[in-house]
Amino acid sequence: MINLFNAQIESLSIHRVGNKNRGENIFLSASTFKLDDEIKPLIKEYFLKPFREKEESYYRFHHETDIEFNELYNLSNKIFDDPYNTHEYSKRIATLLYEQSTHPHIKSGEVYVVYFEGMQLDNIKVPAIGIFKSELKHDFLQFEQSQSNLEMVVQQGVNLQKLDKGAIIFNSNQAEGFKILSVDSNRYDTKYWLENFLGVDVLADENYFTKNYLNFAKNFAKDVVLPAEDKKQEVMFMNRSMDYFAKNDDFEESNYINSVIDNPDLIPEFQNYKTEKAPKYKVEDLTSFPIANKAVTDARKKIKNVITLDTNIQIKMDFVSAESAEKFVEKGWDEDKQMYYYLVYFNKEEKK
């Protein structure tokens, strides 16, 4: 889990890279940019907001031969060892990006290399390196006052509400290639950013496996359980799934299926759904793995456990007490009213 609230920008270097294949040049700034109190909160929010809104999916540097051949990995090591010379290393980072900017679709833009202090990763403060790029320029109006009129001028600039590309390299898991987050608003050149420039692949750990499988289970409940049965059974399936992940240290698929699927007719449906959807949710060949408690806690917050009725009434299930819905909630049909009903058993109302 990351906390970016207390992150501080210690240095900011800004360069411009063009598309090398189109004969556009690279411009390297001679020194760091001096931030004032007005622009500092704006630029910090511009850099970090996309990472707060994005699900945490980590990458790591890699190289098909050896990680030591990954140039950006080596530059990151040098910056963490010698942060006072971040600007000089930032020139090499910008040059590396320029060398990879050869595809016709790649746009020129400004490259920002930032050294952060005060990042929190899994409740531990760590320094981090930010590499960001602004590509798309947007029209905006500027007004100039003359002696007798207010003149309107169209100019172009960067939209501070949308970062085009960015990566944060945390000084953690150095030997394995660091822990890295990436965002890319422009999907047409993702390979250039992730593979050609950053040189990263997915950090496939227990957090990654747990998160992916729970996401797969959630969509199975929505796509298969809900149409086949009803909303209560969809919620109950996820109740049992969360209960299984919370109570076990290791995931084993056959045991999971037997624990969470009540209707035996849905077992082949589950297997067919996994065969079809596994690549989408990245759970192919995933039948056993250690369960990450943090990923389970995060998933519990995001999964909806509410039955919403057309009579403006909602019934909320509790993932912590999954068995309660089985014991104390019944669904039926009232012949007189020609309506479905839920019957809820309880001893007393809790006053909160």
Image (cartoon, rainbow, N blue to C red):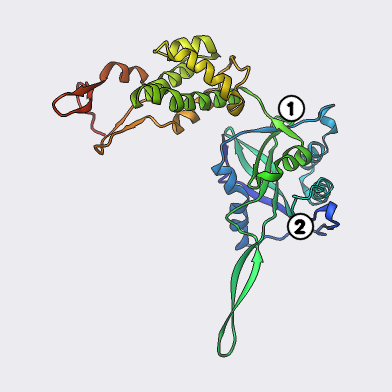
Element at badge 2? Answer: loop
Depth order, front residue of 328/235: 235
Which mark, by number, is residue 18?
A: none
Q: Which is more N-terminal, label 2 or label 1?
A: 2
Decide: few, some or many residues near mark 1? Use Cα within 10 Å; few <14, some 14-19, many ≥20.
few
Query: Residue 68, located in which quarter of the rendered image?
Result: top right
Q: Is residue 268 above or below residue 33?
A: above
Which mark's residue is nearer the viewer, 1 or 2?
A: 1
Residue 320 visible to the viewer: no
Residue 312, by quadrant, is top left
Spot occupied by residue 157 in the image (x, y as percentages of width and height): 65, 64
- Percent across and percent down for residue 105 are 75, 50
Q: Which residue is mark 2?
A: 32
Regarding residue 296, the answer to whether it shows in the image is yes
Q: Residue at left 68%, top 36%?
A: 180
Per the rendering, the mark at residue 176 is 1
Viewport quadrant of the C terminus? top left
Camera-side residue: 216 or 300? 216
